[in-house]
Image (tube, grey):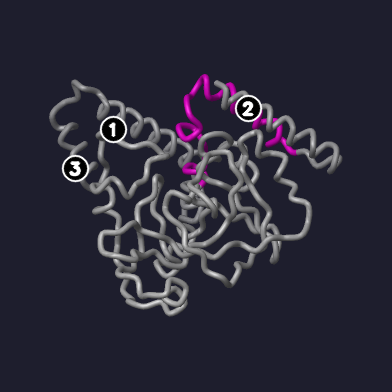
Amino acid sequence: MDRREQFRHLLRLHVLGLKQNFPGWIFPSHHLAFHIHEFMDLFSGVRHWWLFPFEKLIGKLQRIPTNHKPGEFERTIHHSFCTGSFFRQWLMRSNAPPILRYCQKLLDKAYNYDRRPSTHSDDDDVSEHPDVASRSIRKTTFTSAPELTKLLGKEPVEYFNRIPASKGDYTIPAEGASGNSYICFQPEDDYQPGRKWVAGQIQHIFRQQNNGPIQLAVLRSQSVFRLDPFSDFWDNGFEAKLVSSKFGGTLEVIDIKQVAAHTARWAISDDLVVAVNLCAVSLAVVPWLRLLTCP
């Protein structure tokens, strides 16, 4: 309830700011967003009732040649949604028929889904959980990085493409998922929630010695010499920072415990990017961020 009240409070501040700074720039969605608070009472979390999957499905259906029968698509979507909901309800029941329990095992196996409760919190060091690490760590295909060797004064023992994070994986850009390489971290000490961080990108993941701790070589996002409009929202749980779209040229070596989380990078111009701490967003203001940034 506290997070929902915080969301409604921040949304109100956002709309009041629009009225003051952009008179007349108000849309029905700004009003409808206030109903998210009460919809959570009626329908539970936002992911249970948001319309993005339906809009995506409608887009696919609209591109299919039809015989001009109105109403068929809407009925099909509603019927499929109800059928899927009833099926998922039966899968969750302890007294589900044997055939459905067998289907559940097949689906869990197909999607690699583990129904056991998680044994670690978001603040745990994932490298201390060998069951997670053995599943997600992937060694890299190259064996040398001259700029890193020069920085350390010796060649690292191992390089990695991917290591597990508390939510998802941390990767190097060459892995193909560059979004997983964007992080925020505290350069001087272990990460403490609420403290100021800097944004950056992982360039190398490595060990300096056999069975030693995994470390990251990162490039910081360059600073911008202007007032950061997002600094006022940190106290309300929205950790965002205005930075340059370019990264510095000097590598820094940090430990896993210095990393706060992944960051989302919202390009507002060719030169400026808003870096958002995804861990903080997921705990506090996810609905508000969706309204601001999702296309």
Q: Earlier in the sequence, mark 1 or mark 3?
A: 3
- The mark lying in front, picked from 1 and 3, is 1
- What is the magenta range? 27-55
Decide which of tag 1 and tag 2 comes sooner along the chain: 2
- Vertical comparison of 195 with 1: above or below: below
167 with respect to 187 (left or right):
left
Residue 78: x %, y % from top left: 44, 34
Residue 117 tag number: 1
Left or right of residue 228, residue 280 in this image: left
Give 62 or 189, whichever is nearer the viewer: 189
The residue labelled by disc 2 is 6
Whole-number angstrom distance, CA of label 1 to CA of label 3: 19 Å
Q: CA distance from mark 1 to mark 2?
A: 28 Å
Q: Amino acid at mark 1?
A: Pro
Q: Residue at x 68, y 27 (%)?
A: 9
Question: Which type of secondary structure does the marked residue at label 1 adopt?
Answer: loop
| Residue at the far left in the pictured view | 98
Question: What secondary structure characterizes most of the magenta part?
Answer: helix
Residue bearing mark 3: 106
Amino acid type for the residue under numbered disc 2 = Gln
Does 283 sit left or right of 94 as displayed?
Answer: right
